[in-house]
Image (cartoon, rainbow, N blue to C red):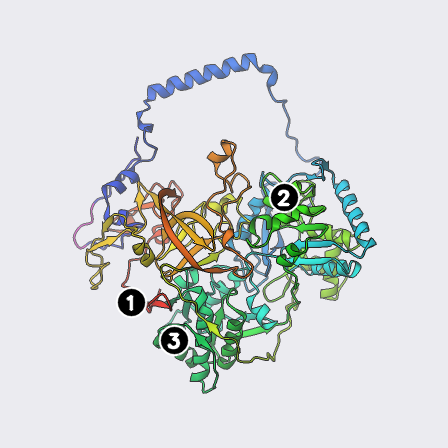
């Protein structure tokens, strides 16, 4: 059984033609295997079923259903009648959407949103145009968050210490009892563990709890920190990507990751628009130094590959060159760094030529000394960056909490039993006499909730942000609301509910947010509060900027460790699908391909082609037809190594084992051009021990086992090394595994004329060829160096 194939007439000589679009080498070369896959709609064996057999099947099933109806008529569901509104609710018209403002809570910044609702049920999320920095744009995690509210695996009830169901009144009584016990001894033995938040109301409640319970401890933890510059400088750096005309990014994927990526992308894009030749001359130029291949690296005009453990030293090298070319003496202690000095000098010369409109940004995982060096260079360049004064972050860490366990532990959100550093013994928390866990998923679908239950603790079902009252701040500090679109679907609670009980407050979150608004807006009126909710932002509420920033030359030595193909570096990154694991049970995100590897549903071990060659990963070779006239192996018709093996449209990957300090993990290998030679990329957020129906494998779950999609990377994450590890070895196990990959999934039949391109296997909603085409390859001018330093660069514009 095959799809109907549309054969367009061949173009006549002299007839105008357009480009041919292709998405894989098999499609480009029109191999027989590709033609067979493209024309086959159904799985193998489906064509063997004849029409007569299908009719007989339907007849038999119809008779079976009829007999079942005779014998089981008493099991029919009761008939219900749908009645119209007796009284039409205000501002509710069936079929007509209503829009409300809110914001997506982030750990570093909130995203202002507009939520489309139908009959008060949220259905679609977009950016809030009232916030000019992000306009109508929103990040993928915010877009997909509406699905989490309807997650069938979310917790629907709360549980007591012995597994009994708790009512909402029972939860409030429990919190009041714990609060009274804590007040008797000033909070001795009480500790809170929470994710970071931008909410001023939560910060106000935390301060009230610490005032009422001075001996209680407040700890915040997140596996992917975004406050590197703040910890180093004491202020928040606010780069102006719209003003900058020369940008150097040091392992900072500001276009693809982080809570501020939407604002950064819009601002950077504004500097890349050019309608005239004069505007093209003033267009922003981007230099990127990075270890893995990111969205920011793909947008770079000039790109240098370097391992992450070397980029802190590279930051000092760039800062020293900036000061030198500006005639300012500075001495940085560098050791072990090998880099193409000519690349550094030309890059810095371009930055200096745009003094006042140049900018250097550094990744949050770089060292504090690297951030100080970058700030020093930006000050010398008169960079397009401002600094804002922000509230101080908590000083206690999860390691401090594990070293001295609390007698009463309150865990607010997060999943530390899964994503805590491997050297932190979270399992020891089971010895805590009282554990209260506020979580979105219950003990059957969440590692921390299960740990709390095993410790005889209490589980409290958490509300979704679309059914909660709260607030937050954007990256520049603008005050934004978090308001509910609907009443909570289940009896659930928020962080504000829990903290208010320990602070001795009986106010609901709505009243608490109103108090915070009145303080920040200096206006208690109902009209002002309603206007804030309608607009979604509070004008003039951004963080105050810091004019004088005291900077000095870092005195510590910058050491670039020795790396080789036998002693690798592992870079730990949040996944494009599940982040750090917080969104592992979201089907929309699981189906969204990784922007670079195009993998879905799982993570892979990213390796460079040079490392793959050393491992002797050599799949079949593919002949690439002549495309252009340049003297390059991609354009001469020579054999090219098809580095990631596809069999019948499926990616078959070799299994490798990574080992460091006696800890080993295994996973499929994906060869990714653009990686530093001695860097291996790993994505966090997979390999869950407990999870919902999206986060775990269906076949394993049906067999009574729980196995998370992909493999767990957190055993490599430690308190001292949260972003990368050195001294890692990699070896193939000899096994293979299929990997979900979308690169060759939705194909277009290559046609001589682009206007005649016919969609293949895409269904009636196929995308236009221009949006799915693969750009014609161009020659790469990369120059390779040793693993001890930076490797290669590409000056061709992307």
**Relative image position of residue 792 (x, y in whole percent):** 33, 67
The residue under label 2 is: 451
- Residue at image location 38% in from the left, 19% down from the top: 55
**Relative image position of residue 479 (x, y in whole percent):** 65, 63
Q: Earlier in the sequence, mark 3 or mark 2?
A: 3
Q: Describe residue 163's horizontal placement relative to residue 658 as left or right.
A: right
Q: Kindly report which numbered mark, 3 or 2, lies closer to the viewer in this rendering.
A: 2
Within-10-Å neighbours for mark 1: few <14, some 14–19, many 20+? few
Q: Identify the image quadrant of residue 326.
A: bottom left
Circle 1 SS class: loop
The residues colored magenta run 10-14
What's the magenta bit mostly, secondary-structure-wise? loop
Viewer-nearest residue: 470 or 521: 470
**Quarter of the rendering occupied by the C terminus:** bottom left
Q: Earlier in the sequence, mark 3 or mark 1?
A: 3
Q: Which mark is residue 344?
A: 3
Q: Identify the image quadrant of residue 32.
A: top left
Count of numbered circles in the view:
3
Q: Is residue 679 above or below residue 10?
A: below
Q: Earlier in the sequence, mark 1 or mark 2?
A: 2
Q: Describe residue 481's horizontal placement relative to residue 658 as left or right.
A: right
The residue under label 1 is: 781
Spatial CA span between label 3 and label 2: 50 Å
């Amino acid at each position: 059984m095959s799809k109907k194939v549309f054969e367009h007439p061949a173009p006549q000589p002299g007839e105008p033609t357009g480009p041919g679009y292709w998405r894989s080498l098999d499609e480009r070369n029109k191999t027989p295997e590709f033609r067979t896959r493209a024309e086959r709609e159904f799985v193998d064996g489906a064509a063997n079923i004849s029409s007569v057999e299908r009719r007989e099947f339907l007849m038999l099933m119809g008779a079976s259903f009829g007999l079942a109806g005779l014998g089981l008529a008493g099991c029919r569901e009761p008939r219900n009648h749908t009645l119209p509104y007796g009284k039409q609710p205000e501002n509710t018209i069936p079929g007509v959407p209503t829009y409300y403002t809110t914001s997506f809570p982030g750990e570093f910044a909130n995203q202002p949103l507009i939520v489309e609702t139908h009959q008060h049920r949220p259905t679609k999320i977009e950016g809030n145009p009232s916030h000019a920095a992000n306009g109508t744009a929103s990040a993928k995690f915010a877009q997909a968050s509406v699905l989490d509210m309807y997650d069938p695996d979310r917790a629907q009830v709360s549980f007591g210490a012995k597994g009994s169901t708790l009512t909402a009144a029972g939860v409030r009584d429990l919190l009041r009892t714990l609060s009274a016990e804590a007040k008797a001894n000033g909070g001795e033995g009480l500790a809170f563990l929470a994710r970071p938040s931008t909410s001023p109301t939560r910060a106000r409640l935390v301060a009230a709890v610490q005032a009422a319970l001075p001996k209680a401890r407040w700890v915040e933890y997140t596996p992917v920190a975004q406050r590197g510059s703040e910890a180093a400088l004491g202020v928040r750096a606010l780069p102006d990507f719209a003003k900058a005309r020369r940008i150097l990014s040091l392992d900072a994927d500001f276009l693809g990751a982080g809570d501020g990526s939407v604002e950064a992308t819009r601002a950077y894009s504004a500097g890349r628009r050019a309608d005239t030749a004069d505007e093209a001359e003033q267009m922003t130029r981007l230099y990127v130094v990075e270890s893995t291949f990111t969205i920011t690296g793909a947008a770079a005009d000039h790109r240098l590959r370097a391992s992450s453990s070397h980029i802190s030293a590279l930051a000092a090298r760039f800062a020293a060159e900036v000061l030198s070319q500006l005639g300012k003496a500075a001495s940085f202690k560098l050791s072990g760094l090998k880099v193409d000095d000519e690349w550094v000098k030309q890059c810095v010369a371009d930055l200096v030529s745009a003094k006042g409109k140049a900018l250097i940004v550094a990744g949050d995982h770089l060292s504090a000394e690297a951030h100080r060096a970058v700030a020093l260079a930006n000050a010398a360049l008169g960079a397009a960056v401002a600094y804002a004064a922000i509230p101080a972050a908590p000083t206690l860490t999860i390691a401090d909490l594990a070293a001295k366990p609390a007698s009463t532990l309150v865990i607010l959100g997060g999943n530390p039993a899964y994503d805590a550093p491997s050297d932190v013994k979270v399992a020891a928390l089971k010895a805590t006499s009282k554990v209260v866990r506020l979580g979105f998923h219950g003990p059957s679908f969440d590692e921390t909730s299960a740990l709390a239950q095993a410790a005889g603790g209490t589980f409290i079902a958490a509300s979704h942000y679309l059914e909660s009252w709260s607030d937050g701040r954007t990256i520049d500090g603008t005050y934004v609301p978090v308001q509910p679109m609907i009443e909570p679907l289940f009896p659930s609670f928020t962080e504000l509910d829990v903290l208010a009980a320990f602070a001795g407050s009986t106010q609901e979150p709505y009243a608490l947010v109103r108090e915070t608004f009145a303080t920040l807006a200096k206006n208690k009126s109902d009209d002002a509060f309603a206007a804030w909710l309608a607009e979604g932002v509070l004008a003039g509420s951004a963080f105050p900027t810091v004019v004088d920033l005291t900077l000095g030359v870092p005195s510590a030595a910058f050491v670039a460790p020795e790396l080789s193909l036998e002693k690798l570096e592992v870079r730990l990154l949040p996944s494009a699908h599940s982040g750090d694991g917080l969104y592992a049970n979201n089907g929309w995100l699981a189906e969204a391909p990784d922007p670079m590897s195009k993998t879905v549903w799982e993570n892979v071990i990213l390796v460079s082609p040079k490392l793959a060659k050393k491992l002797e990963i050599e799949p079949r070779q593919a002949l690439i037809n002549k495309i252009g006239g340049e003297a390059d192996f991609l354009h001469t018709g020579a054999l090219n190594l098809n580095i990631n093996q596809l069999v019948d449209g499926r990616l078959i990957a070799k299994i490798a084992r990574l080992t460091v300090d006696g800890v080993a993990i295994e996973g499929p290998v994906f060869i990714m051009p653009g990686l530093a030679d001695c860097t291996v990329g790993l994505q966090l957020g997979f390999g869950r021990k407990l999870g919902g129906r999206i986060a775990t494998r269906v076949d394993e779950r049906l067999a009574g086992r729980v196995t998370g999609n992909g493999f767990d990377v957190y055993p490599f994450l430690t308190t001292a090394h949260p972003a990368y590890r050195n001294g890692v070895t990699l070896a193939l196990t000899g096994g293979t595994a299929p990997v979900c990959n979308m690169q060759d999934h939705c194909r277009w039949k290559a046609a001589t004329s682009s206007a005649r391109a016919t969609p293949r296997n895409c269904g009636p909603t196929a995308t236009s060829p221009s949006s799915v085409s693969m750009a014609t390859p161009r020659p790469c001018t990369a120059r390779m160096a040793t693993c001890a330093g930076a490797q290669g660069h590409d000056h061709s514009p992307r």
